[in-house]
Amino acid sequence: MRRIFTLVTVFTLVATFAQAQISVNKILCENRTNPIGLDNTQPRFTWELASAAFNVSQTAYQIRVSTHSDFRKIIWDSKKVASDSSVHVGYKGKALSSHTKYYWQVKVWDNTKKASAWSETGYWITSLFNTTEWRAKWIGPGFTEDSLRASPMFRKAFSSTKKVSSAIAYITAHGLYEAQINGHRVGDAYLTPGWTSYGKRLQYQAYDVTDLLAIGNNVVGVTLGSGWYRGLIGFSNNQNFYGKDVALLFQLHVTYADGTSEVVLSDGSWKSSTGEITYAEIYNGETIDARKIKKGWALNGYNDAGWSGVQVMDYGFKTLLATYNEPIRKHETFKALRVLKTKKNEHIVDFGQNLVGWVKIRLKGKKGQKITISHAEVLDKDGNFYTDNLRAAKAQDIYILSGDGVELFEPHFTFHGFQFIKVEGYNADLNPDDFTAVALYSDMNPTGSFSSSNALVNQLQHNIQWGQKGNFLDVPTDCPQRDERLGWTGDAQVFSRTASFNMNVDNFFSKWLKDITADQTEKGAVPFVVPNVLGKGAVGSAGWGEAATVIPWNMYVAYGDKQVLKDQYGSMKAWVDYMKNQAKDDLWNTGFHFGDWLFYSVNDDTDGTSAVTDKYLIAQCFYAYSTQLLINAAQVLGKTDDYEAYGKNLKRIKDAFVREYVTSNGRMVSGTQTAYVLALNFDMLPEDLRPQAAARLVDNIKKYNDHLTTGFLGTPYLCHVLSRFGYTDEAYKLLLQDTYPSWLYPVKMGATTIWERWDGIKPDKTFETPTMNSFNHYSYGAIGDWMYRVMVGLDTYNDGPGYKHIKIMPHPGGGFTNASASLQTYYGTVSSAWAIGGDRLNFDVEIPVNTTASVYIPAKDAANVTDGGKPLKNGKPYQPANSKENYIMVELGSGTYHFTAPIEVQKATVK
Ligand code: BGC
């Protein structure tokens, strides 16, 4: 019996592997699932493959596109194409039409020449390719706005007499908009149309509203808010940055089942009025007066006789473009963790997480009763509500009750950064169930997970992810709570690689990078913030301008997205040329720079304890790094002339650096950690000077009792440089350091996001200066990249970007007994996990189909390594340069692998 059973099992296994059919798992168009409203004429297709077998790759694909879901009318058939490409494969069929739904499928052949079945059917809907297709009019309120600029509402009744087969609404606004059709909200995106450099680029959104239309009378209703367009923006509290009047543009294409169609347009026939939103500002919050609700205004039969007409404005359509990045959506909700009363008798609700969004409340009270909801990230050392760090941002939502029973309130055109709210004007004890905090952020797919045997480090990862969620709100903002919340370029560049692990930020950054290009000066200087609301002069700082080069390169590496490099190449080159033109004798040592922002400093520093790094030394490092990234991009895009020209320039930049900032013994003019980190990370020093420079860096860390002293620019690369030069132990010491300054000190102080400052809350529980003390600033969260890429070892080779050619080289150590991470790539999930069990290291990896991986097993002798319980085959010993760490390297195809190796103390100290 047992023999028969084994035979059956073996037979099934062989049959499975033999038969293992490759299948197409997930299909994307322009990195999205069934996108509506794409205006590019050659969208790119991506598909993920699956197979139970090992070592499976694609050898050919075939794509077909049709205007019919049964593919009876083929628009494009690629036929069988011999290729292993399955990411960003461009459409090459007949010219596409505007405002049309296209269906597509793909099938592939694997390396056993077996074909897959056709994939599920995907679709995309094209938008308006030409601005001439806009027939709607820009309309504004037909009345004089009050001083508070209450949110104007627009209404239009229209009838659709026949069965509707499809209805697509194109909407945008000057200001923010929320639309309804027959009382139903259009879509689930918030703070639309999002924030771009409105003067040059204004996104519109497309919505499939087929199900919202009724045969007969219909009503569309749209409410506007000031938003980024004319609301308070920037820290000099100026309004009307892009314009002083809000306006709506609405165009609804209705196609009837009988093939006829009609268009409903915003024009002079609409009606306007105001309602319950009597005030709304992003920084200051929103006021809703429920006594002013116009019940049923967006429903058929509502009498709008008393409403005003509208003003038709002639803003034109040349800045309009379709939306590519994910919309802002509602995500996690938080119930009240606790309700408390402070010593100052304040009624507080604690949601237990510093998040970005707003609070939904349910209240019962008297007509005209005014409830004020204030928002704060922290309580002060006496447990009282603390809002000084919000500076001029009031961050208050005010609700005036109608008195009709239980009332529900939530804002529309604002957002807050908070963990705590204070409730005023409500005389009863607060019922925690009446308060729900709602997190709002760009709806990027979560892709990465990291965990380890250390709870504090896991909390650090949590804080990094919530810092990203809190600040990726259509634009990567520095902070979400005070009168700033701006697209600071430096912060975004230092965090971009970490961000690409936690979520799919490909489209998010691709969109924002186009705003960098839009706001870059003619001379190529990159603004401090994008969209640039700080003025033409707020440009050109080293480390901040690098957003123009670092982020495109990181998106290429993380997603294999060549289009980002193509789209941004001009901007990358302009920034490098700007620095080149600023430089004298290859030295860029002029102009304003932020330097190593928020480096470790002590008051009354009489002996140079503060880690002040020469700003021009830093500038020269980033001049070189951006030039290097431009060279990389030129190589990928086959721009050989640039590749050679900038290659020569790079050498001169580095030579000038050594001449200016390095003594013949290799000592830097600034002896700070950041100086050595940047010089080593960007290969500014000749090979022979590098080991001693790394040793000086480690000496410096010891001088500060194993503490870092780096600011925004040194921090992202600190641990990378230490592990690259064989000091992984020191890197772990810094990671596990939990007194100030360190990554874990805020965690120990109860942080649930990343702080702007290493000591936002000081050990004595007092606060750093309120002039600049955000508790939700992701820059220092850039350590996440090292945790994924070095600690657990998940990485991609630049020559196989987007994890086509994966590199897995973990660095067990630091007293951790396990660490693991996984990443959802366009090819599928790649993961790495190591765990120490007794005297063996267990090491599991998962490699997606259609990729290959170079996997480095921490072990000295291949003979002691097992693979799936059997002796490992084809393992090659490997030792990284500058390090004594030992690895056995194996080249792997797709599959899941389980290796074990003897625990060998991986002495990482330098050779
Ligand atoms: C912002 C930072 C930014 C810095 C540059 C601050 O106000 O919050 O995120 O990088 O200014 O100086």
Image: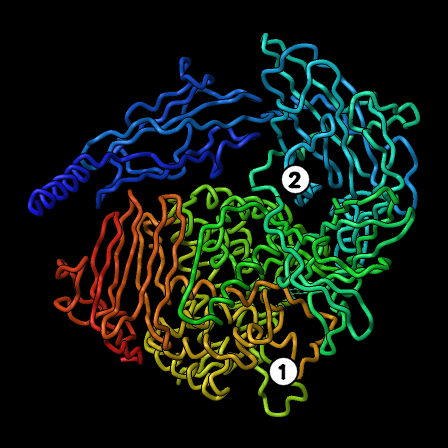
| Type of amino acid at the residue the image marks with label 2 | Arg
Q: Which residue ends up furthest to the bottom in the rendered image?
A: 606
Q: Residue at x 26, y 35 (%)?
A: 22
Instruction: Name the disc covering residue 201, or none.
Output: 2
- Asked if ligand 1 lies within 8 A of label 2, the reply is no
Dots 1, 2 in contact, CB < 8 A = no
Mark toward the start of the polypeptide (1 vs 2): 2
Q: Residue at x 58, y 55 (%)?
A: 469
Q: Would residue 248 be seen by someone viewing this image from the given angle?
A: yes
Q: Residue at x 36, y 26 (%)?
A: 63
Give the crowd class for mark 1: few <14, some 14-19, many >=20 residues within 10 Å: few
Tell me residue 271's x, y (percent). Answer: 85, 26
Q: Quadrant of ligand 1?
A: bottom right
Instruction: Name the disc covering residue 52, or none.
Output: none
Count of labels shown? 2
| Residue 467, quarter of the rendered image | bottom right
Tell me residue 839's x, y (percent). Answer: 23, 75
Give the crowd class for mark 2: few <14, some 14-19, many >=20 residues within 10 Å: some
Check the image and report above or below for 397 versus 876. above
Q: CA distance from mark 1 to mark 2?
A: 46 Å
Q: Which residue in the protein does label 1 denote? A: 763
| Type of amino acid at the residue the image marks with label 1 | Pro
